[in-house]
Image (tube, rainbow, N blue to C red):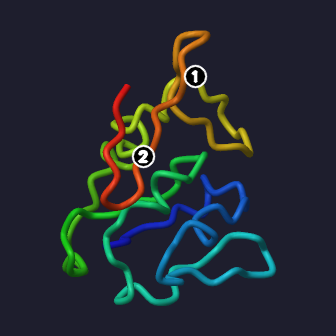
């Protein structure tokens, strides 16, 4: 479940707002989104994956953490790294960068439901 949006790291790109399938975030006049509907979070990690500033933390737990629980700062932004999206980014970049592929390598194809993709 979405647990944290670090406003000091947010670059106001609204990628989390656009990526969230359940409309958990609200846009604000400052450009820094707010977590408005935490209970609607499906723990899909889309917001964290698309955040180019690693300003979000989604807990793998599907219920909110207790208020007194310390959030693991070392895990914030780690989901992007596990996806391969964390290497080669420039701090403060406004664009999310996907995984790096060797020059000339075709990106992986995504199968439609029921379709088998080979090669």
Report which residue position mark 2 lands on: 77
Q: Is residue 118 above or below residue 62?
A: above
Residue at the (62%, 57%) spot, across then down: 8
Residue depicted at x 37% and y 80% = 41
Residue 72: percent from left, percent from top: 27, 53
User: Where residue 32 sits in the image (x, y, percent)?
Assistant: 68, 70
Quadrant of the rendered structure where residue 58 is? bottom left
Which quadrant is the N terminus positioned in? bottom left
Q: Quadrant of residue 95?
A: top right
The answer for how far apart the CA atoms under marks 2 and 1 are is 14 Å
Give the foreground label among 2 and 1.
1
Whichever of labels 2 and 1 marks the residue nearer the N terminus, that label is: 2
Q: Assess disc 1: are there few (<14), some (14-19) or many (≥20) residues with their C-alpha within 10 Å of its C-alpha.
A: few
Total of numbered circles in the picture?
A: 2
What residue is shown with label 1? Answer: 88
Q: Quadrant of the C terminus?
A: top left
Q: Does residue 28 appear to the left or right of 19 in the view shown?
A: right
Which residue is at the front of the view, 70 or 37?
37
Give the residue displayed 46% in from the left and 89% down from the top.
37
Instruction: Give the image location of residue 35, x and y in percent.
Output: 51, 80
Q: Secondary structure at mark 1?
A: loop
- CB within 8 Å, label 2 to label 1: no
Q: Quadrant of residue 81?
A: top left
Q: Nearer the viewer, residue 109 or 22?
A: 109
Question: In the image, is residue 100 above or below residue 59?
Answer: above
Neighbor class of circle 2 (other Cα within 10 Å; few <14, some 14-19, many 20+) is many
Residue 64 image offset from top left, x and y in percent: 25, 80
Q: Nearer the viewer, residue 45 or 5?
A: 45
Where is 67 relative to 82, above or below? below
Q: Is residue 35 left or right of residue 17?
A: left
């Amino acid at each position: 479940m979405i647990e944290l949006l670090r406003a000091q790291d947010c670059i106001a790109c609204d990628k989390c707002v656009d990526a969230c399938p359940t409309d958990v975030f609200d846009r604000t006049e400052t450009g820094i989104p707010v977590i408005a509907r935490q209970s609607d979070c499906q723990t899909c990690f889309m917001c964290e994956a698309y955040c180019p500033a690693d300003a979000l933390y989604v807990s793998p737990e599907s219920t909110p953490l207790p208020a007194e629980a310390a959030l693991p700062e070392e895990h914030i932004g780690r989901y992007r790294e596990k996806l391969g999206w964390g290497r080669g980014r420039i701090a403060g970049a406004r664009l999310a960068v996907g995984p790096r592929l060797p020059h000339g390598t075709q990106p992986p194809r995504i199968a439609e439901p029921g379709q088998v993709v080979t090669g």
